[in-house]
Image: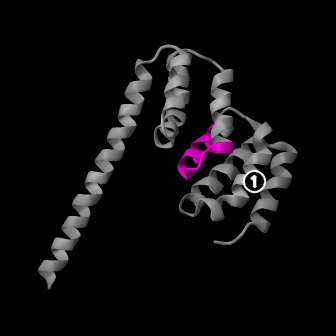
């Protein structure tokens, strides 16, 4: 019996390792593709032609891509893809990356959408709801002022329990 448990554990570890290798490979391929692009238009095209999984990594690496090209601030096209992700993405981790960028770039104009995402996270993205909610609270907190002062306690006191 102990031998069977060992085999099951070993198979599980091998499966997990293969999954991790595939995931890391996809992320590095996305960064390599992005790194080869020099024009913003090409990055937007890559984003628009990709599925949500790759779009998530494009959002994740966007700040680094902009920085390596000495693009300061947030260009309009980057704002547009963040906005698109916040309102249209179906993948919870994709949404999380967009929320993280609202914090990084101080996009407080999305605070109402962030509140909605926080409230809907458990029902619509249960597997990723903790990630989404944490990113939303952090983003709203970073905006400061009355937005944070009133929104965060309201979210935490009136949110659906898990």
In terms of depth relative to the viewer, which is nearer, 81 or 6? Answer: 81
Quadrant (top left, top right, bottom left, bottom right) of the C terminus = bottom right
Inspect the magenta stretch and tell me whether residue 88 lies in it.
yes
Q: According to the image, label 1 marks what residue?
A: 116
Given residues 88 and 23, the one toward you in this image is 88
Image position, residue 160 (x, y; %): 71, 69
> How many residues crowd mark 1 within 10 Å: few (<14), some (14–19), many (20+)?
few
Q: Residue at x 73, y 48 (%)?
A: 114
**Residue extent of the magenta highlight:** 87-101
Count of residue discs: 1
- Can residue 106 be found in the magenta stretch? no
Please say whether residue 74 is visible from this viewpoint.
no
The spot of residue 65 in percent (x, y) is: 50, 24
Q: Is residue 103 left or right of residue 13?
A: right
* 79 lies above or below 6: above
**What residue is at 39 percent from the left and 38 percent from the top?**
27
- The image position of residue 139, as x and y in percent, is 69, 45
From the viewer's perspective, is 11 left or right of 115? left
């Amino acid at each position: 019996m102990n031998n069977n448990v060992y085999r099951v554990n070993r198979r599980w570890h091998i499966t997990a390792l293969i999954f991790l290798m595939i995931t890391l490979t996809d992320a590095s391929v996305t960064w390599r593709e992005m790194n080869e692009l020099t024009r913003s238009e090409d990055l937007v095209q890559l984003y628009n032609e990709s599925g949500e999984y790759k779009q998530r990594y494009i959002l994740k690496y966007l700040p680094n891509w902009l920085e390596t090209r000495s693009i300061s601030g947030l260009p309009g096209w980057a704002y547009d893809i963040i906005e698109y992700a916040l309102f249209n993405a179906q993948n919870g981790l994709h949404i999380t990356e967009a929320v993280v960028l609202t914090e990084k770039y101080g996009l407080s104009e999305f605070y109402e959408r962030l509140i909605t995402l926080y409230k809907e996270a458990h029902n619509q993205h249960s597997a990723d709801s903790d990630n989404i909610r944490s990113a939303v609270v952090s983003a709203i907190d970073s905006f400061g002022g009355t937005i944070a002062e009133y929104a965060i306690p309201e979210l935490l006191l009136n949110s659906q329990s898990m």
